Amino acid sequence: MAEVRFVPRSQWDTLPVQPPAGMWLIRAVPFIKGILAALGVGAPLALIDAATHYAFPTWIPLVPLWLAIALCAGAMVIAVLAIRPYYAERKLGYTTWPEKDPAPGPSGR
């Protein structure tokens, strides 16, 4: 398999695949943060309810759950839109999608 190089954001305007896959990742970040925030609010509410049997009004624990579901749907739409440019970039030998631990190339195995 050919080596895939990472292209920094400053060079995205000159690439053949537009919009680059990395742009979709940037667009997904607010959704991911929202999901984590909704779960961060919903989990303590669920624990308080389970531990103390405090009767919240029904809508209070459900709002973070609904928000998390809606944000997950948005994140999935972004993932579907990002997959085509991601694979197109990989075929051309580059990527704008940063990887934390990229797989080693043929020489590193």
Image (cartoon, grey):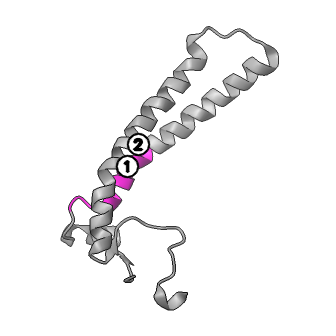
Q: Position of residue 27 (x, y in %)?
A: 35, 49
Looking at the picture, does residue 29 appear above or below residue 34? below
The C terminus - image quarter: bottom right
Which numbered disc covers residue 79? Answer: 1
Q: Is residue 38 magenta?
A: no
Q: Is residue 22 magenta?
A: yes
Which residue is found at the position 43% from the left and 30% from the top?
70
> What amino acid type should be assigned to the residue bearing mark 1?
Ala
Q: Position of residue 16 (x, y in %)?
A: 18, 70
Q: Few, some or many C-alpha atoms within 10 Å of disc 1 (few <14, some 14-19, many ≥20)?
A: some
Q: Residue furthest right?
A: 52
The N terminus - image quarter: bottom left
Q: Residue furthest front?
A: 1
Give SS at disc 1: helix
* Front one among 91 and 27: 91
Give SS at disc 2: helix
Q: Position of residue 2 (x, y in %)?
A: 37, 83
Residue 89 shown left or right of residue 62 in the figure: left
Look at the numbered discs 1 and 2 and tell me whether their residues touch, using CB distance below 8 Å.
yes
Residue 72 shown left or right of residue 94 in the figure: right
Q: Position of residue 62 (x, y in %)?
A: 56, 19
Magenta span: 18-30
Q: Few, some or many C-alpha atoms within 10 Å of disc 2 (few <14, some 14-19, many ≥20)?
A: many
Looking at the picture, does residue 36 appear above or below residue 18? above
Which residue is found at the position 40% from the left and 47% from the top?
28
Which numbered disc covers residue 75? Answer: 2
Q: CA distance from mark 1 to mark 2?
A: 6 Å
